[in-house]
Image (cartoon, rainbow, N blue to C red):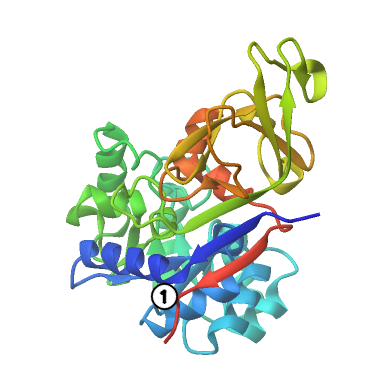
Amino acid sequence: MATASLRIDLDAILSNWRALDALSGPQTESGAVVKADSYSLGAARVAPVLARAGCRKFFVACAEEGADIRQAVGETPEIYIFGGHAAGDSDMIGDLNLIPLLNSPEQLNRHFEALPGKPFGIQLDTGMNRLGFEADDWFKAAPAVLHAGPKLIMSHLFCADTPEHPANLAQLTEFRRMTEGMNVPRSLAATGGILLGKDYHFDVTRPGMGMYGGLPFAEAKPVVTLSLPVLQVRDVHPGETVGYSAAWTAEVPSRVATVAAGYADGLSRRLGNAAQVWFGDVPCPVIGRISMDLITVDITHLDDTPREFDLLGPRQGVDAVGEVIGTIGYEVMTSLGHRYERHYVGGAS
């Protein structure tokens, strides 16, 4: 069976990173978030492009991801682990010179005992109540931590995609209170924080979703094109149904294309009878249920028979698809399946 293809524009990723780096200002270093396999786009291909362009700080979720990035970018760049120093990860962290962002007194003790003298950073909780030292624990630990020389102190904004939200200023104030005068590089802003302005930039920013072409960086260049091949086209008479559960019924003589992709490829079943795909500049409605491997599309209004449709591309990005199904572009992006035939363009040194 023909397979859907996912085109990933490495030059667009690099351009978006450079644009966010410029917004961060000349006194701030821009890292790159490459967790979840670069949001499913392939960290082994993305990270080296950024490293050749001058990125020297990469952020991942766990030590296993850090090991993959270390293999991709070599020994020089710093690789930070958002999840910190988990039990059982000491050998990997030490052998690969990964930098855990310690989140608690327990992790601090684990790191100091297992890997004394090895690099580390600190993550602070400034109101998100997810990961990070709370203020009381942090101020108790700070003298020993600062004596040991952390590479970075960071926190994470939880409402940065909503610039007017009062939590942004509250977190900024708390981050300053917890770090002022400590003479350690600081990081607060991911993509949304970068867009909030220079007060949020500090020493290091962490471009993520905006680098991959998604909101909140509305000026980002499109990065992914997901093309779905047509397997068959049929005529459907009025009153006939299409797909499982008879979820779509033809009201007029119709032409229906069946295309190769489905929920096994990370496409939500909520796209059925709700989304559209594109044939050039012409939108075509997705009809009926999304199957495991197949989607059906109404092409009655087309003069030509398409060979493929684009679900993602310049005319419809991950955020637009996410809006249709009641989620965010991050979920759409990271759900892109492994069955796609992947094509990388650009990224030459």
Q: Nearer the viewer, residue 92 or 205?
A: 205
Q: Vertically, is 221 above or below 259? A: below
Q: Position of residue 137 (x, y in %)?
A: 47, 52
In this view of the protein, which residue sits in the foreground, 164 or 114?
164
| Image quarter of residue 13 | bottom left
Q: Residue 272 placed where, x, y %?
A: 65, 27
- The structure residue drawn at horizontal position 81% and vertical position 54%, both measured from the top left corner, is 1
Q: Position of residue 336 (x, y in %)?
A: 63, 51
Quadrant occupied by the C terminus: bottom left
Q: Residue placed at 79% from the left, 39% from the top?
A: 292
**Residue at position x 53%, y 49% in the image:** 131
Which residue is identified by label 1?
151
State whether residue 321 appears in this view: yes
Which of the 4 image quarters holds residue 271? top right
Left of 147 or right of it: where is 336? right
* Residue found farthest to the front: 303
Identify which amino acid the numbered label 1 is placed on.
Lys
Please give left or right for residue 153 compared with residue 39 in the image.
left
Tally of numbered discs: 1
- Tell me residue 323's x, y (percent): 48, 31
Q: Is residue 77 above or below residue 227?
A: below
Vertical side of 93 occupied by 32: above or below: above
Name which residue lies at 66% across and 41% down. Answer: 267
Image quadrant of residue 258?
top right
Of the pair 245 and 176, the residue shown nearer to us: 245
**Residue at disc 1, secondary structure:** loop
User: Position of 194 compared to 86: left or right?
Assistant: left
